[in-house]
Image (cartoon, grey):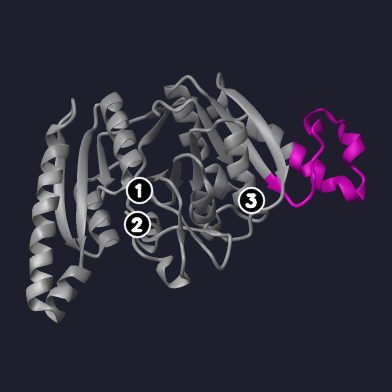
Amino acid sequence: MYPFQNILFPTDFSTQSCAALKYAAAFARDGNGRVVIVNVQDERVPSNLLRLNQSALEAQQNRWLLQLQTDTKELLADSLLEGIDVEPVFVDGDPPIEVAQVAVDYGADLITVMTRGRKRFSRAFGGSMAEDIIAEAPCPVLALRSPQHDFVQQRDAEVHIHLKRIVLATNFRPSSVAATQLAGQIANRMGAQLHAVYVIGDYFEQLSAMFPEGGLAALTRLRSYVGERMSHLANGGARRVRTHIAEGRPYEEVVRLAAKQDADLIVIGTAVHNSLFGGSAVLGSEVERVIRNAPCPVLCVPAARVVTPLPALVTQPVM
């Protein structure tokens, strides 16, 4: 899974979306890979757009193509991409679905997105649009926002990855297996400290208050189970994992630990749900809150999708 070989960089050429370019370039350099630049439009873009003469695009109805051609050429000339294999791709349709399809077509193993901005993709690439892409993505997605801790440093025209501390949010369910593996691989390659955290949700405390005997017994068993699993995780790999067990609201505890440890990256599994009442993929609410509140970039690693029978269950925490 790591290092990444094919990095997908979706953009609408705004300053907001292009802030993720240095991360795409840095991972491409680290893995001797390539960057696929993908832009989604409302209309079909000629496959030979970059080779078309500007005079052929100066007609009123083609000015958007002229602007698209200009923006693409300027991005391709960015010094961050110097010496990197780069390929621009233009598609039309619904951005999250089209980005996911390009990821499949090009064998992408990482997508970089900014998570703030207006929702409309053709205006700005961010906000809930980025979360929709994370939900649809078949590969890990690096979610970025500004301002935020930055683990990519630029020297002259080149960018380099500097990861010292990584926080892994786990629950030992299938949704976190791939995230655990990837976090370990990145930590081993980068020589970074890996901090694994399991958050016992505050709903167990509420259950204990409502059902003193049964609730307390369940909480005691869970604490014992989590302690054993974290002990195995800490001693089961080549690199020692520092483990943390917290109790409270999952996203708050994950964000708090990342801030306390001055983490460079949070890695989290994203079990995506499809409601039977609609085809849209939905992230868990706790995952969304981690992404929106994290003090550092968040690497969202997809797991197998499940079908949620009722809309009310779509927002259950999946971490």
Taking the spot 82% from the left edge, 37% from the top edge, the residue there is 46
Using residue 66 as the reference point, say whether residue 318 is left or right of it: left
User: Badges 1 and 2: C-beta atoms under 8 Å apart?
Assistant: yes
**In the image, which is nearer the foreground, mark 1 or mark 3?**
1
Percent x, y of residue 287: 37, 57
Identify residue for label 3.
95
Q: Name the kind of residue labelled 3 in the image.
A: Pro
Percent x, y of residue 50: 78, 31
Identify residue for label 1.
175
Q: Which mark is residue 318?
A: 2
Question: 20 or 155: nearer the eye?
Answer: 20
How far is the residue under mark 2 from the one under mark 3?
24 Å
Residue most extreme to the bottom: 210
Instruction: Inspect this view and state whether residue 10 appears.
Output: yes
Question: 52 or 45: nearer the eye?
Answer: 45
**Residue bounds of the magenta highlight:** 40-69
Q: Is residue 218 magenta?
A: no
